[in-house]
Image (spheres, rainbow, N blue to C red):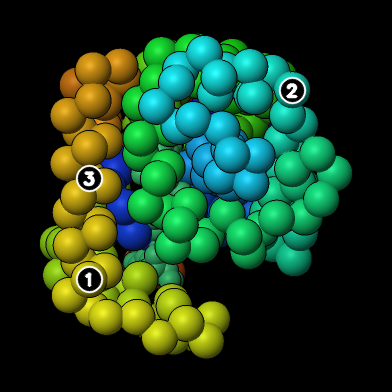
Amino acid sequence: MLNGIIIAIDGPAAAGKSTIAKKVAQKLGFTYIDTGAMYRALTHKAIRSDINMDSDKDLGDLLLHTEILLIPKNGGQAVLIDGVDCSDEIRSQEVTSNVSKVAAHTTVRKLMIEKQRALAEGTGVVMDGRDIGTAVLPAAELKIFMTASVDERAERRFQENEKRGIHSSLSQLKEEIENRDRADSEREISPLKMADDAILVDTTSMSIDEVADKLIELAEKRMER
Ligand code: CDP
Ligand code: CDP
């Protein structure tokens, strides 16, 4: 790795953030951190432990007693909760429909941001989420706000589910994405919002490789500085 920089990728659901972040991190030899997986992990544990997801205090206490590890695996990332691989479970419908509620709590966000900053220390990093460029790593050298039309994003999630053997309804997926985007954008603490110094990348008609190449080019320019 040459000069490690911090690349923050934010944007709405299913815009391609984690797919692209993984590729860019691999190409540059950087660490990839999927912050959405951390909120999903806490939500999964809260459901399993029957914790009141409306209680900031109960969720904060739960998070303090939960070990969430992101481990590189097959070019991607495995998510371990208290030592158990829950990479598939955190993508369940039940987790997806509750995660925005969990992620809106003050203490949860405060503790998560501390963890995320610690993970980003001393290394080149690509971190994706909703508030990376605005709240977690505001000094990131490269900030991307990645988006795509909601129809395209719903179609991508639909195809992704089909590949995983999950048959879903396109219209329901679209509605779920719109609801989650709205909840994430309207919450009080670090809402989903483009940072003033972020570069907008609309991937609606771009392939994965085109988006990845564009980001790698932008990152290399930043590293030359
Ligand atoms: O992959 P997908 O777009 O479905 O979502 P994700 O990145 O796994 O994030 C799941 C949820 O976690 C989001 O809808 C947000 O509610 C929350 N999240 C957040 O609040 N802040 C972040 N930095 C990352 C995710
Ligand atoms: O992390 P985020 O929720 O933003 O999206 P993702 O999980 O990385 O991508 C959602 C789906 O879109 C994945 O199945 C990707 O393979 C696909 N994708 C795509 O078809 N074209 C792109 N330019 C980016 C992602």
Q: Residue under label 3, please give it.
A: 181
Residue occupying the point 18% across, 62% down: 175
Q: Is residue 134 left or right of residue 52?
A: left
Sequence-wise, the earlier of marks 3 and 2 is 2
Q: Residue under label 2, please give it.
A: 65
Residue 4 visible (yes or no) = no
Residue 169 picture quarter: bottom left
Return the mark for residue 172.
Answer: 1
Sequence-wise, the earlier of marks 2 and 1 is 2
Question: What amino acid does circle 2 point to?
Answer: His
Dot 3 beta carbon under 8 Å from ligand 1:
yes
Residue occupying the point 40% across, 45% down: 98
**What is the distance, in whole Å, between disc 3 and disc 1 at their CAs?**
14 Å
Sequence-wise, the earlier of marks 3 and 1 is 1
Q: Residue 78's spot in the image, x, y percent?
A: 72, 54
Residue occupying the point 63% across, 64% down: 88
